[in-house]
Amino acid sequence: MKAKDPRIETKDQPSMECPKRQPVEGQGWDSAHLRRIQEHPCYSPRAVHSFGRIHLPVAPKCNIQCNYCIRDFDCVNESRPGVTSRVISPREALDRVSEVVEKFPNIRVVGIAGPGEPLSNEETFETFRLVRGRFPDLHHCVSSNGLLLVEKLEPLNKAGVTNITVTLNALSPEIGEKIYSFVHYHGKTYRGREGAQILLENQLRGIEGAVKNDMTVKINTVLIPGVNDRHAADIARKAKDLGAFVHNIMPLIPQHLFANVRPPSPEERKSIQDECATIIPQMRHCRQCRADAMGKLGEDHPLSLLENRKSRVAICTRGATGVVDLHFGHTTGFSVYEVETKNLSVQFLEERKVGQAYCKGPECDLVDGQEAALRHITDLLKDCTFLLTRRIGPTAEASLKKAGIVPVISADTIEDAIKKIFIKDEPGW
């Protein structure tokens, strides 16, 4: 008997807007499929609260150039796809997974999402082989542009990859040529419509082949106003027809050649998601993760935290109390501590004054001058990995996270609060 489709709404489980998956020959809801969905935070809204993932940045090379993408291999203060604090080797990746699983047992997914195209890097397959040999119960996941997917299906199967995400931004070369500068395929570089056509044909064949090979497929689409925003429903229909499990519509992050393109508003994105949800389930909790993300979605910590290195933490405190006791918006000076992440030694570094608190009123709404004050604070703390505070508003929290600074709510003593960040009992894990 086939198990119940995990996307059907129940009293304690939110629906993903589609009552039944497109039937795929030979693929039912058995226990193995249910595990790879229910324990993967990108495939299940419920898994977000219970399970984490680790991305291993072993794949620096890429075979296409998207007009919205800038890869960065030495980046600690941005939170977006294509960046990592550094590229690591497959052997280093195995060591990192071993340490992560021991420290954070709710990590259930090992993913490779760059910072380049995983299928263009042999290190991807070597990493999965090593990890599978030591941790056969972890789910293996890869994010790809799909150009090489057809020819890499067999090695992906052998490496134990069960979940795959393909970024499909266009179903016509006329649209695709506006999104991709070039496609490098089998030793030759293709541009314009020709390159977009090659990419599209391989993507569609690859998605179909992945489903037939018993992989659980997610389709990502970067929503680019004026380029493919009226095309999203067509992509959703194609994704369903090919047997994909879920569709993820992500907002454009304006950069590179699309630096001056307006990103979609939350309302625009939601409207398109709602339309596409009548076709195929929509992922609505994506955080557009780094290539070295680790932890639960929205509570990421860079992989570099596992190295024996120093990390700086800013504290909202009145100082003399020795406790995290100030609202971020009421803080006029941040106590900065330095932490050795392996032995958890904590040392006071300095006090950094901002002169004027971020909040000017009881509700801490954005008023004249506050945006500049927030930028000043973010720049002041740019070398810090975490900020400990008694409370923080959503605007300030989002701004800090965008700058790579993770806000953590605490009312503990400073030393206890800092140590909880780096041990497995930390609530965020």
Image (cartoon, helix red, strand yellow):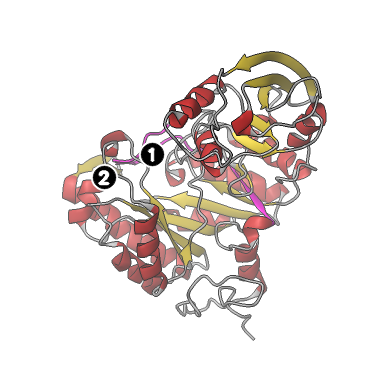
The residue at 34%/71% (across/down) is 237
Foreground residue among 284 and 412 = 412
**Most distant residue in the top direction:** 350
Q: For the magenta stretch, what is the residue range? A: 50-71
Query: In the image, 153: left or right of 192?
Result: right
Query: In the image, 347: left or right of 25?
Result: right
Give the residue type that dot 2 points to. Answer: Tyr
Which residue is denoted by mark 1 in the rendering? 62
Q: How crowded is mark 2: few (under 14 residues within 10 Å), some or many (20 or more)?
A: many
The residue at 48%/73% (across/down) is 17
Q: Looking at the picture, how far across and down is residue 118, in whole percent? A: 46, 44
Q: Looking at the picture, how far across and down is residue 20, in whole percent? A: 50, 80
Disc 2 is placed on an element classified as strand
Tell me, yes or no, if residue 319 can be seen here: yes
Prevailing secondary structure of the magenta residues: loop
Check the image and report above or below for 242 versus 293.
below
Foreground residue among 380 and 383 = 380
Q: Which quarter of the figure is the N terminus placed in?
A: bottom right
How far is mark 1 from mark 2, CA to CA?
13 Å
Give the residue type that dot 1 points to. Answer: Cys
Check the image and report above or below for 78 versus 218.
above
Check the image and report above or below for 21 versus 289.
below
Which residue is denoted by mark 2 in the rendering? 180
Query: In the image, 187: left or right of 356?
Result: left
